[in-house]
Image (cartoon, grey):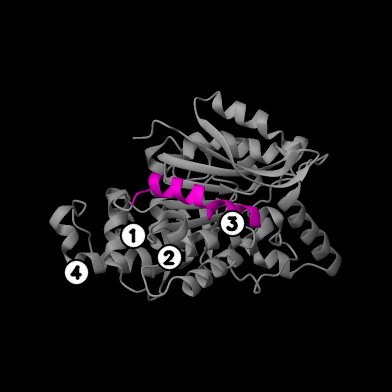
Amino acid sequence: MKVITANFVTCAVKECKTSPASFPLHFHDAELEQQELEFQPEFIRNVIPRIDWEALRATANELGFPSLPDAKPEGEALENEQTMRDLHRMLLETHVSEGKLVCGNCNHAYMIKEGIANFLLPSHLGEIYS
Amino acid sequence: MLPTPDTSHVSFDTIYEPSEDSYLFLDTLASDSESKWLSARFPNQSTSPLVVEVGTGSGVVLAFTAAQSEKIFGRRDILTLGTDVNRNACIATRETATTAIKAEQQPTPQSIHISSLTADLCAPLRPGSVDVLLFNPPYVPTEDLPRLPSAKDNDPATAEAMSRSDKFDNDSYFLSLTYAGGADGMETTDRLLEAIPGVLSARGVAYVLLCKQNKPEEVKDRIRAWGWQAESVGSSGMQAGWEKLVIVRIWREDHS
C-alpha cells in the first residue's frame, strides 16, 4: 500500500464519515518498504493539486518523514526538482507493508498485512452501523 | 486488439475467472467512443484521475485500464485503487496491475497502482475522491444474498487452520460472493448505486455492468431521477432481441 493511499481513505464506519477526526486515518506501528519507481516529475506535478496537504503533513509526520513545507507547492515550487523528488519518494515509492490505520473518531484499527489493508468491519460494528 | 492483462498467477479457487462480462468491460473502455469521451472529461492539463474498481477479482479490468491508460484517457498519469471483499483477490489484483503496467508502459511515464484494499464496496473511500468508478457486480439473481465477510474471514491464519472440507465450503462461499446478486441480481448493485453520488468527484463517472434480469432500463430511469445522466455505452450477447449484458455510464453533466 503506497503512502498516497492515506490521502484517499477514511473510516469505513458510516457515522464517522462526517467527523473531521476520521481523516486522515492515523498510522500506528507502520513498517515501511521502499520500492524504486522511475521519477516522473510531470506525474507528481499533476498529482499534487489533488492532495489534501494538511492530511499529508500529518501522515508524513506519523511515518517519520522530514517535515513537509507548511503550504502546498504551487507555481514555481512545482519546478523545484528536490521537492518533487522528495514527494515522489514518499507518496509513490514508499509502501506500508505492516501496521494499522486508526480512526481518530471511533478508534477502530484497520490492520495492514503484507501491504493489504483490511477495511471489513468486525460483525459487531457492521450490525451497529450499517 | 489491445492485450488482455496476464492473470496466470491467479488461483481461481475463490476468485472470479475473467469471463464474457470482464471482456465486455475491456472492450467498452477501450472503444473509440468511450476513450474519446473520457479523454475530453479528463484532459491532460487536469489533475491525475483516480480510477477505482470495486470488486476487482483477478484485477483484469483495473490492470487493463491502468496499462492502456494512453488509449483510454489519452494520458498515462492515472492512479488506480482496487477494493474487494476477498483478501486473495486484493493480492491477485496488485500483481495483475503492476505486471500489466510494466509490460505495456515502457518507457515511463507509467500509471501507478496505489493499493488494493479489502473492503465492502466503497466503504473506506474518502467522499468526493473517485474520478472513475468501475463495477462488474455479482449480478446473477439468486434466492439469497451471501452474508458479507468480516475481517476475521480474511485472516490468513483462519484459512491455514481449515480442514479440507471447511476449505471447500469457504472457497464456495467466496465464489458465491462473485456472482450471487440476490433479488433481481441487484441487492449489491443497489448499495453501490446509492454510494455513487457521495464517493464520486464533481467530474466523476461510474461504469456499472448489468444483465438483462437486472432491468437496465429501470435502473437508468432511477439514476436519471437523481438529476444524473445514465446511458448504455457497451453491450454484448443478443437474447430474444435484448442485450444480455450492458455497461451503463453514470455521470453529472454540470461538473465544471
Instruction: Determine the CA span between mark 3 and mark 2.
Output: 36 Å
Same chain for marks 3 and 4?
no
Quarter of the image with the C terminus of chain B is top left
Q: Circle 4 sits on which residue?
A: A82
Q: Is residue B40 magenta?
A: yes
Q: From the viewer's perspective, is residue A92 above or below residue B229?
A: below
Separation (CA) of disc 4 from disc 2: 25 Å
Q: Amino acid at mark 1?
A: Glu
Please tell me whether mark 3 or mark 4 is closer to you in this view.
3
Magenta segment's dominant SS is: helix
Part of the protein shown in magenta: B23-43
Local packing at callout 1 (Cα closer than 10 Å; few below 14, some 14-19, many 20+) is: some
Residue B199, percent from left and from top? 47, 40
Looking at the rendered structure, the secondary structure element under dot 2 is strand
As rendered, which of B25 and B195 lies closer to the eye?
Answer: B25
Secondary structure beneath label 3: helix
Under mark 3, the amino acid is Leu
Discs 4, 2 touching: Cβ within 8 Å: no
Q: Residue B101 vs residue B161: left or right? A: left
- The answer to whether marks 1 and 2 mark residues whose Cβ atoms lie closer than 8 Å is yes
Between A111 and B253, the one lying in front of the other is: B253
- In the image, are marks 4 and 2 on the same chain? yes
Residue bearing the label numbered 2: A30
Identify residue for label 3.
B26
Asked if both marks, 1 and 2, belong to the same chain, the answer given is yes
Q: Nearer the viewer, residue B34 or B103?
A: B34
